[in-house]
Amino acid sequence: MSETLDLSHYAKPAADGTCDLELAVEGVHCGACIARIESAVKKLPGVADARLNFTNRRLHVSWTEGALEPARIIETLEKIGYHGHPFVPLRAEQEEAAEARRLTRYLAVAGFAAMNVMLLSVSVWAGSDMTPSTRDFFHWASALIVLPAAAYAGQPFLKSAWRALRSGALNMDVPISVGVILALVMSLAETAKHAPDAYFDSAIMLLFFLLVGRALEHAARRKTRAVAGNLAALKSDTAHRLTGGELVTVPVKALRGGDRVLVKPGERFPADGTVVGGGSEIDESVITGETARRAVASGARVYAGSLNFNGALTLEVSAAGGGTLIDEIERLVEKAASSKSRSLRLADRAARVYAPMVHVTAALTGIGWWLAGASLHDALVTAIAVLIITCPCALSLAIPAVQVVASGALFRAGVILNAGDAVERLAEADTVIFDKTGTLTLPEPRVVNAGSVDPDLLQTAARLALSSRHPLAAALAREAASPKPYDGVTEEPGQGVRALIDGAEARLGSAAFCGLANIAHAPGSSLIVFTHRGRSAVIAIAQKLRPDAVEVTARLRLLGLDLRILSGDRPESVRPVAEALGIAQWQGGLKPADKIALIEALKQEGRRVLMVGDGLNDAPSLAAAHVSLSPISAADLAQAQSDAVFLGERLGPVYDALRVARRARRLMKENLWFAGVYNAVAVPVAIAGLVTPLFAALAMSASSLTVTLNALRAARGVRAAPEQPS
Amino acid sequence: MNVLVYLIPMAVGLGLIGLIAFLWALKSGQYSDVDGAALRVLQDDDIEPRQHESR
């Protein structure tokens, strides 16, 4: 690129005179890549450090300020075969990293304490000939280890329980906190009285198991978040900014209101704005779903993401939030999001039933024993034993464990979750609404009549098309078997390209340019004509269905789902798609507000709607639906509203997502039932006053392991997507 | 059994050293790229000598 690339927006100056830059790197797949990238970047003058994080595919470079033009780093990567995309780490991502470290510290402390205390406890259980004074010593040693460890590692549960209680709610952390605190207090009192049983080990083991669940859940979420961050960086493009008559390539994020930007044919608009120079036709299908092109000239408003077709345009970037269409959409999104009744998560629903039941049972047990003539001390000890044994170890692991395994399986299938409870809501969907443009069809137009064109003529045309930036030519160029452009190609702006091939002139472009009379063509498709040595071919280019759309919709129907299409495009272009997929209920020409109204009507019927859409115009309906999915090519605002994003050209991930989610929900319910059965067995034993610390330890470990192993089944039968993320 | 008075604190103390070592490793960022560490161990730094990073 002859223009200079300005990256000052991304480089962060540090206090010690160095500059830092983070890059998401594409194409890293093995250990050799790490060495190649790091050594190449370190050879640049002024670079102090370069380190590639293989886990999240990010390169961190720091250099002495002023000694290096940051664009050189990207050039260097390009030279050795990698694409680097600069980005600013999200604030949320940094906070999550800190949270992950905190959780790991809690986990380490709880694990350390649990192991050491178990050593002492096993001695007490096994040592039938142990003297009471030795036993007391062991108990005091346990107390010394467990009390500080529990005070530290129990923080996440205690804090969350306290928050819940203060707002008058109950969550799973309330019974956990009550159980742990009472177990510790009772054990301390018993130890002081030289009693034979203490439950220090149960309390810390409980914390350890629960922390394992939390840490795993967090790690899975963080990994998908990092991949989503990289994908966002990969998507964010550069723009050609006009600064004092000079053209500078800047990251789109660095554009400000009032900047003037040049948009060449075949490029997408980097920002919203007003056309101030030039004239062209633009494709706004990402914005409205409408596939017919719109002619624009000076004064026309255009939106980020639209595709410029014919001529170069100069654009004046409007201030953020200044676009009338965007404003309207954002207003609808806000309204839809606020009216959406948050469905209660399964875990919270279980907690609502479980917590009061446990506490009432424990209280009744204590009162019962006391009334039956037991001493106050014995009645209290039995009541606390009930609380310890019912501590929802299995229950609090039951759902997070399934969620971790399910999100891992979805990740491999090419689905990245945005919302934590998306799995549960996906499983509940009974109606699927598809957008057409970019969702059922591929985001870019394709050649649709490849079968009826002479293969060698098509290949020659495709190779010639490699030299043109026109979007129709770009679609044709995808058909080229080898990406070798011809030499000496000249482009006639707005008409086509020509070149000398095998001693004869070949032309590719409009019918008039190729000397043919105008040809009638089907609505919704564009024609491009190719002539060479008296032979000519008419190539039709149109929106094409995703390769597996027919198969996937058929399989979705087998899952018992009701399929519909709601599109912003004209009805005559929606009909063929609906007919090809066998979807009887479809509507075209809908405005964003119409789509919401239709979704609300379905909700009134008691349906749970899954919305799959990509356009800016779909963002409000994505927010309004019970659960939503977007392809990775979707507009940013649409992606931000959807619960999950799927990668690649296939529609298959939609089916995988629904299937994995349904299986996961079944496993969650199974685990909840298992926890119920466990309590049905263990609670009577505890009420009868027969629980020993050994029994408690065995019961808790066995139930936790069982639900975790059951959760692993959520990943079965999911095949990996052909395109791996990052 | 008096020997236990020394042995148990010693055992716990050794465990504590391990815990502190882990917390230090966590803090110094050694767990931030677990997948990369598995591959870096195979790099031929000794064949093409290069100074090690201090991080």
Image (cartoon, coloured by chain):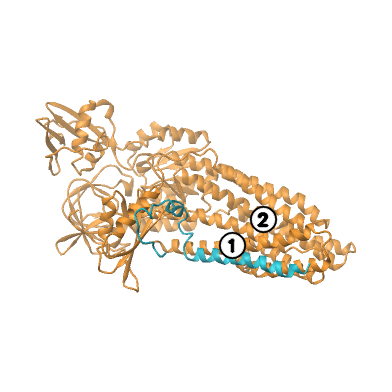
State the residue in front, A637 or A695: A695
Q: Which of marks 1 and 2 is nearer the N terminus?
A: 1
Name the chain under label 2.
A
Q: Which amino acid does label 2 sit on?
A: Cys
Q: In this view, does A102 lie above or below B45?
A: below
Same chain shared by disc 1 and disc 2: yes
Q: Chain B is drawn in which colour?
A: cyan
Q: Which amino acid does label 1 sit on?
A: Ala
Secondary structure found at label 2 = helix
Secondary structure found at label 1 = helix
- Say left or right for B30 vs A196: left
Which residue matches tag 2?
A: A393
Which residue matches tag 1?
A: A108
Return the x and y of residue A585 as percentages of the image width and height: 44, 37
Give the residue drawn at x 40%, y 65%: B54
Q: Quadrant of residue A52?
A: bottom left
Q: Quadrant of residue A111?
A: bottom right
Q: Chain A is drawn in which colour?
A: orange
Give the residue drawn at x 61%, y 44%: A667
State the residue in front, A39 or A572: A39
- Say left or right for A393 vs B28: right
Give the residue drawn at x 78%, y 70%: A189
Residue A154 visible in the current orientation: no
Residue A343 visible in the current orientation: yes
Name the chain under label 1.
A
Judged by depth in the image, the label closer to the viewer, 1 or 2, is: 1
Return the x and y of residue A101 as percentages of the image width and height: 51, 63
How far is the residue under mark 1 from the one under mark 2?
Answer: 18 Å
State the residue in front, A632 or A106: A106
Mark 2: few, some, or many residues within 10 Å (few <14, many ≥20)? many
Give the residue drawn at x 72%, y 49%: A678
Q: In which quarter of the image is residue A467?
A: top left
